[in-house]
Image: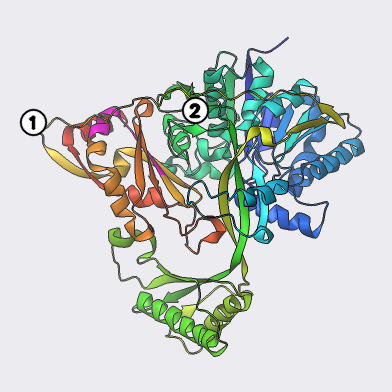
């Protein structure tokens, strides 16, 4: 008999995540599924290099050995299903290693794999077709430079594996939310044409895909959870057959689940909220609403499905030379000036070596004096600090050129201005620059297979459907022009929550008003142009957007070409825009004094 409600625990958000989630869910004793999200584009390139060196590698080995193996018996006892994209670039080998561990434990758990996301074999044809990057328009890189090429698969193959009796489902690249949506499709027999339900399940997956980010991690009001972050609770999505969703967390844990924490995660890295494209459904999150039902329980409603795309998105990672970087520290009088002089003089030494060997100059050099200017640009508040950090990084096609700069910076310590110090250790070594290339490929060009303990499972892909028209959301409300108010200027942080992140070379900054009454005043001041002006020193184009989400009284700002290439292609100190929200939260907003006073009084 099918359940009418399931509980899904989100145990990880990236490869390298702490191993706290699964033990929490086992101790909670009331979850039906546990999902693990390990993959980012750069993660796949690392796994591809591992598989190239050893054909048995290319997956998240610690997921098997550290997370799963110690807990297999308890998972079996409680009957909890597990879904994970830890298979990375080699899901079949990941499954074989796990099956061996299951046999050693004397258990009979069934392990299924979803394969078919690797599109490496399609690259020669794509090259012949002259395919270009879907964002930048750049041509396909040289095939020999490509490290990985994977399509973002959806949730229906996962559901098919579960319906065939799999206890554990391992995938390669799928969209992060698919591990959650797959459980919902299986549990409730949701059909591919029930678009609003698919959008709801996808939203539930999006909210828990980054682990404790929805339960107090990276939270604007971090002071409210700081003393218990060491045992922060990992999130649980309670999903009903009717599409109802409540976000909570494991029992007896730290952290917090509020409209603020959930709203921040909803906004996280979503681009256009009316067109959040996934392989199973194009979602519209603009009308989503949040309601605090009880402590650590937030209801989420209003996700809309607008259609089924006919393409998979494909991400290629490719090698584009080498980079290296180091961080040192300066103390004393004019510490910032000494730090910059040290960095610039070391760079001159290294550049002379390039000249002597008739080599090209560095493609890019980044010098950040952190503690003085760094990411703040024109918004920086200059303080004559007596202690700063200086970061120096470079990019070059020649590995040796990167080594020379690191060596010359180290070699200058006895000739540098006084006050230089660092944490003792080995000199930094160059690492590959990995860039991202994105494209679309027709779904029918790929063969996605589901294999459960050696048996291939039939499944039927959903046919694409036209998208419903883009909803007319309208502009956010603005203050009345004839108001005669006593005004005050307060930082945005007093009026809103905010969280930021990346999508390739795009920075996303989500902002949600703490009170609907604040929204008109935020909207008036925090325009797309104003936010772009705040970060113009980091942007290489004038391309930016502001998207309005009336359901949560919020905005998502997207700054294009703002991360120096993003990921490990960037030399920036923050190549994934993690600090951008913090740089925006002190933006001054003019607002009537009584609104701030009323809100403060009602929340004391």
Left or right: residue 240 compared with residue 384: right
Provide residue 23's location: percent of width, then percent of height: 70, 36
Q: Does the magenta stretch include residue 293?
A: no
The 10 Å Cα crowd at callout 1, few under 14, some 14 to 19, many 20 or more, is few
Quarter holding residue 110: top right
SS category of the residue bearing label 1: loop
Magenta span includes 517 = yes
Q: How crowded is mark 2: few (under 14 residues within 10 Å), some or many (20 or more)?
A: many
Which mark lies nearer to you, 2 or 1?
Answer: 2
The spot of residue 132 in percent (x, y) is: 54, 50
Q: In this view, does 206 lie above or below 4?
A: below
Question: Could you tell which of marks 2 and 1 lies nearer the N-terminus?
Answer: 2
Residue 60 at x, y percent in the picture? 73, 47
Which numbered disc covers residue 532? none
The residue sitting at 51% across, 50% down in the picture is 504
Q: Residue 283 carries which label?
A: 2
Asked if 37 appears above or below 329 in the picture, the reply is above
On the question of residue 281 being in view, the answer is yes
**Which residue range is magenta in the image?**
509-520
């Amino acid at each position: 008999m099918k359940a009418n409600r399931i509980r899904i625990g989100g145990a990880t958000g990236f490869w390298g995540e702490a191993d706290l989630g699964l033990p929490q869910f086992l101790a909670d004793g009331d979850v039906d599924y546990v999902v693990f999200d390990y993959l980012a584009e750069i993660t796949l390139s690392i796994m591809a290099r591992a598989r190239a060196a050893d054909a048995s590698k290319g997956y998240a080995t610690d997921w098997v050995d550290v997370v799963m193996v110690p807990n297999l018996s308890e998972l079996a006892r409680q009957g909890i299903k597990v879904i994970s994209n830890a298979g990375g670039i080699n899901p079949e080998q990941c499954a074989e290693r796990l099956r061996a561990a299951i046999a050693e434990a004397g258990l009979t758990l069934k392990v299924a794999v979803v394969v078919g996301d690797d599109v490496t074999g399609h690259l020669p044809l794509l090259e012949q077709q002259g395919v270009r990057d879907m964002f930048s328009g750049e041509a396909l890189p040289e095939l020999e430079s490509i490290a990985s090429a994977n399509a973002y698969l959806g949730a229906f193959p996962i559901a098919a594996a579960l319906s065939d009796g799999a206890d554990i489902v391992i995938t390669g690249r799928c969209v992060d939310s698919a591990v959650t949506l797959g459980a919902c499709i299986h549990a409730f027999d949701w059909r591919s044409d029930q678009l609003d339900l698919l959008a709801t399940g996808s939203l539930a997956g999006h909210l828990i895909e980054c682990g404790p980010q929805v339960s107090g991690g990276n939270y604007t009001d971090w002071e409210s959870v700081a003393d218990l972050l060491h045992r922060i609770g990992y999130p649980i999505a309670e999903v009903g057959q009717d599409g109802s969703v409540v976000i909570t967390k494991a029992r007896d844990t730290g952290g917090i689940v509020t409209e603020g924490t959930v709203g921040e995660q909803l906004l996280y890295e979503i681009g256009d909220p009316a067109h959040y494209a996934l392989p199973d459904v194009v979602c519209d999150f603009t009308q989503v609403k949040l309601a605090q039902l009880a402590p650590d329980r937030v209801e989420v409603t209003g996700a809309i499905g607008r259609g089924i795309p006919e393409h998979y998105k494909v991400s290629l990672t490719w090698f584009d030379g080498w980079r290296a970087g180091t961080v040192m520290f300066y103390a004393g009088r004019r510490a910032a000036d000494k730090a910059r002089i040290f960095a610039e003089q070391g760079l001159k030494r290294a550049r002379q070596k390039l000249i002597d060997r008739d080599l090209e100059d560095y493609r890019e050099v980044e010098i950040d004096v952190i503690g003085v200017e760094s990411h703040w640009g024109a918004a920086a508040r200059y303080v004559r600090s007596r202690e700063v950090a200086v970061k120096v990084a470079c990019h070059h096609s020649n590995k040796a050129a990167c080594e020379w700069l690191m060596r010359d910076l180290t070699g200058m310590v006895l000739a540098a201005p006084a006050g230089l110090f660092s944490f003792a250790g080995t000199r930094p070594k160059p690492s590959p620059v990995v860039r991202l290339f994105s494209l679309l490929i027709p779904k029918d060009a790929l063969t996605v297979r589901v294999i459960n303990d050696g048996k291939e499972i039939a499944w039927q892909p959903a046919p694409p459907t036209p998208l419903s028209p883009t909803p007319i959301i309208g502009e956010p409300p603005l203050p009345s022009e004839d108001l005669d108010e006593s005004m005050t200027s307060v930082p945005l942080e007093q009026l809103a929550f905010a969280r930021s992140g990346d999508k390739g070379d795009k920075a996303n900054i989500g902002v949600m008003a703490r009170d609907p009454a604040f929204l008109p005043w935020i909207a008036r001041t925090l325009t797309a142009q104003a936010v772009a002006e705040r970060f113009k020193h980091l942007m290489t184009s004038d391309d930016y957007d502001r998207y309005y989400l009336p359901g949560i009284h919020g905005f998502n700002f997207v700054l294009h070409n703002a991360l120096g290439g993003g990921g490990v292609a960037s030399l920036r100190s923050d190549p994934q825009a993690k600090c951008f929200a913090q740089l925006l939260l002190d933006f001054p907003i003019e607002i009537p004094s009584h609104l701030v006073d009323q809100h403060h009084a009602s929340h004391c």
